[in-house]
Image (spheres, grey):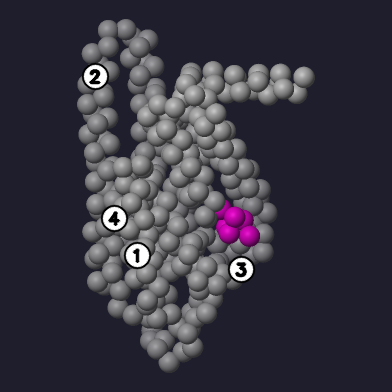
Amino acid sequence: MKRHNQSCVLEFILLGFSNFPELQGQLFGVFLVIYLATLIGNAIIIVIISLDQNLHVPMYRFLLNLSVVDLSFSTVIMPEMLVVLSTEKTTISFVGCFAQMYFILLFGGTECFLLGAMALGFMLGTLQMSWVSSFPFRGLNEINHISCETPAVLELACADTFLFEICAFTGTFLIILVPFLLILLSYIRILFAILKIPSTTGRQKAFSTCASHLTSVTLFYGTANMTYLQPKSGYSPETKKLMSLSYSLLTPLLNPLIYSLQNSEMKRALMKLWRRRVVLHTI
């Protein structure tokens, strides 16, 4: 349907889960608890690693940066989504929408490559956000999604987006799918190494650790691939919202539990920090 003669869009309306008005209150409570748990979990990791000199080694600096990215990624999406759930329908300015899109791409791309591709995540956010924001938007301004992610906003563009979709597919393949395949290959090598462990208990512990890591990786990369490899795919809006929640809400919540808080050195550092605080309060 042509919308070229209609007025230019100055703001968008995020619909969120407005199709389920009876669940708005429950969803708000659940997502608020998950968001607070994500903030607290990642903040604890950042504080512990920053204050404990024994953890100032490459592996824990990597975990610290992962927590910073997870906390930032979740914060870009969750507060706005909670507002949508509490008001049923909410507007977001044109500039605000594309600012959110930029940071989703920035932190999402950075998480894919983590520290090694910090600059690549910056480039991804700048290029895609600038390109999509240059499209004309007229008439329809309701974004049937939980945030201003590229595929959802792209559906409202009054222009031929085929070239952008081809470039977006290529960028997604390089930034999401390639790292995911490399991670899977590394886990295959780890699997063969685990099978050589003589102790049954050792093998079980290693398998348990790898399984939890692989679950988090698959959840993040799998749903992100399904969303961004096909910006105008045939998935229903509700399915797209659930996939978005998988990598923007669940992954930042699970990563502190899987990668850090199960680590014995992190537990010792947390207890050390807690005892120090108790001593300071008793003095």
Identify the residue position indicated by label 4 in the image. 172
Residue 193: mark: 2
Is there CB contact under 8 Å for labels 4 and 3? no
Give the residue type at disc 4: Thr
* Circle 4 Cα neighbour tier, 10 Å, few/some/many (<14 / 14–19 / ≥20): many
Is residue 79 part of the magenta span, yes or no? yes
Residue at the disc numbered 1: 128
Mark 1 to mark 2: distance in Å? 40 Å
Q: How far apart are marks 4 and 2 (CA)?
A: 31 Å
> How far separated are the C-alphas under marks 1 and 3?
24 Å
Position of residue 97 measured from the top left corner of the image (x, y, whole percent): 50, 67
Residue at image point 23% right, 13% down: 196
Q: Is residue 218 above or below residue 146?
A: above
Q: What residue type is labelled 1?
A: Gln
**Mark sitting earlier along the chain (4/3):** 3
Where does the magenta region start and end? 78-83
- Which residue ends up furthest to the bottom in the rendered image? 5
On residue 90, the disc is 3
**Where residue 119 sits in the image (x, y, percent)?**
33, 51
Dot 2, crowdedness within 10 Å: few (<14), some or many (≥20)?
Answer: few
Is residue 50 or residue 228 the one in the foreground? 50
Label 1 or label 4, whichever comes before in sequence order: 1
Amino acid type of the residue that numbered disc 3 sits on in the rendered structure: Thr
Mark toward the start of the polypeptide (1 vs 3)? 3
> Along the line of sight, which residue is nearer the eye, 262 or 145?
262
Magenta span: helix, strand or loop, mainly? Answer: helix
- Residue type highlighted by circle 2: Ala
Task: Tell me which residue sits at (38%, 45%) in the image.
Answer: 111
Asked if one can make out residue 227 in the rendered structure from this viewpoint, the answer is no
